Amino acid sequence: MKTKPFSPWEQVELAAKLADLKEDHYRTVLTLSAMLELLVDKGLITREELNAKADELDNQLESFISASLHPMP
């Protein structure tokens, strides 16, 4: 089945949606970064704890993705 190519106006709309998503992503990351800095500044967590947790979550995600791509029989 062939798909119809996007019209120029649809391409403009898609580009606008992408720009909105980029702005939302930037604001989310900025807010998260500010919150993490405040937690560290207030002594509620250390950078080492933060890095260790990030590594732990990254490893869990990698394991989950790997298991999803290569399920055991």
Image: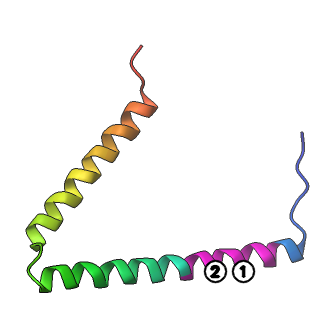
Q: How is the image coloured?
A: rainbow
Which residue is label 2 attached to? 19
Residue 65 position, x and y percent, is 40, 40
Q: What main secondary structure does the magenta stretch of the protein show?
A: helix
Residue 4 falls left or right of residue 73 = right
Q: Quadrant of the N terminus?
A: top right
The residue drawn where x is 38% and y is 82% is 31
- Do the residues bearing badges 2 and 1 touch, measured as CB atoms within 8 Å? yes
Residue 71 position, x and y percent, is 42, 24
Query: What is the number of the mark on residue 68?
Result: none
The residue drawn where x is 18% and y is 79% is 39
Q: Relative to 73, does residue 42 appear above or below in the rendering?
A: below
Q: Give me the C-alpha separation between circle 2 and circle 1.
A: 5 Å
Residue 14 position, x and y percent, is 75, 72
Residue 69 falls left or right of residue 2 = left
Residue 12 falls within the magenta-colored stretch: yes
Which residue is label 1 attached to? 16
In this picture, which residue range is highlighted in magenta? 11-23
Q: Relative to 62, does residue 66 appear above or below in the rendering?
A: above
